Amino acid sequence: MSFRSGSPRSLSPRDRNRRAVGALLLLLLTGVAALFWSGLAGIWMDGMSAIVNNTKRYVNQGAPIAGSYSVTVNLDNLDENIGKELYRDSTRSISIGSFVKHGEHYLICFRSYGSYSLKGAELASGNRHIFDGTAFSTETTARMKAELNGVTYESSYAGGGGINWKDGDEFCFYPFPQQEAGQTQPDSGLAVLTVEGLYNNRWTKR
């Protein structure tokens, strides 16, 4: 019996292309699976809320922020106040997100901006975000006063919410509470808004 010897049959260009495409697809699928497994995909799509909602991996070990913080607003031009900062440190900030007047009443909302990564997240806010083991809730910790023309007003809380942005939340006040019948809201001048009771929400890995 005789045997033929020789070099192995070389792949055709079509076969080589198929193998290359198959290897590339396998590499892509492996990469996508790794992104989801690590949590990077969720953070890329949902931002900070991906960390907040992942209670199996992260826990909120936040604490109150001491002190009070002030910002001056111009009642003659509400739009020019947008973006003015109430608070800032190396990774977090709080600034005026909106300032409007509905009828006779002003409404100001502060926008909180934090930082997040696979290691966790931090957010300085007027809200404390809580997970009690079964459900999420938001507790307002901030209090505000408004001073105008020598008069100090105890501002009333108007609302807030959860982590509705990829990088933070908001909390709102009525700077000048409803006055007694016959009194009108201030409509001009510079007012100093002072906020205390801020809270540093800090999510770390368990």
Image: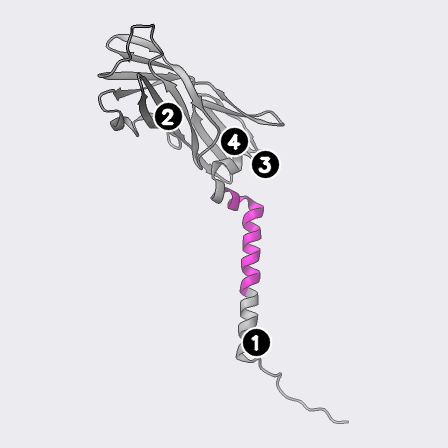
Task: Say whether marks 3 and 4 touch (CB < 8 Å).
Answer: no
Mark 1 and mark 2 lie on one chain; the one further toward the N terminus is: 1
- Image side of residue 57 versus residue 190, left or right: right
On the image, the x and y values in percent for residue 78 come to: 26, 24
On the image, the x and y values in percent for residue 101 come to: 31, 21
Task: Say whether marks 1 and 2 touch (CB < 8 Å).
Answer: no
Magenta stretch?
Answer: 24-44
Task: Say whether marks 2 and 4 touch (CB < 8 Å).
Answer: no
Element type at marker 2?
strand
Mark 3 and mark 2 lie on one chain; the one further toward the N terminus is: 3
Mark 4 and mark 1 lie on one chain; the one further toward the N terminus is: 1
Element type at marker 4?
strand
Query: Eyeballing the image, is 162 above or below 11?
Result: above
Q: Classify mark 2: residues with Cα within 10 Å, few (<14), some (14-19) or many (20+).
A: many
Residue at the spot of label 4: 203
How far separated are the C-alphas under marks 1 and 3? 45 Å
Q: Mark 4: which amino acid?
A: Trp
How far separated are the C-alphas under marks 4 and 1? 51 Å
On the image, the x and y values in percent for residue 159 come to: 44, 22
Q: Is residue 164 magenta?
A: no
Question: Which residue is drawn at the image coordinates 49% and 22% (left, top)?
Answer: 63
Q: Is residue 34 magenta?
A: yes
Q: Mark 2: which amino acid?
A: Phe
Q: Nearer the viewer, mark 1 or mark 3?
A: 1
Residue at the spot of label 1: 15
Q: Classify mark 3: residues with Cα within 10 Å, few (<14), some (14-19) or many (20+).
A: some
Q: Nearer the viewer, mark 1 or mark 2?
A: 2
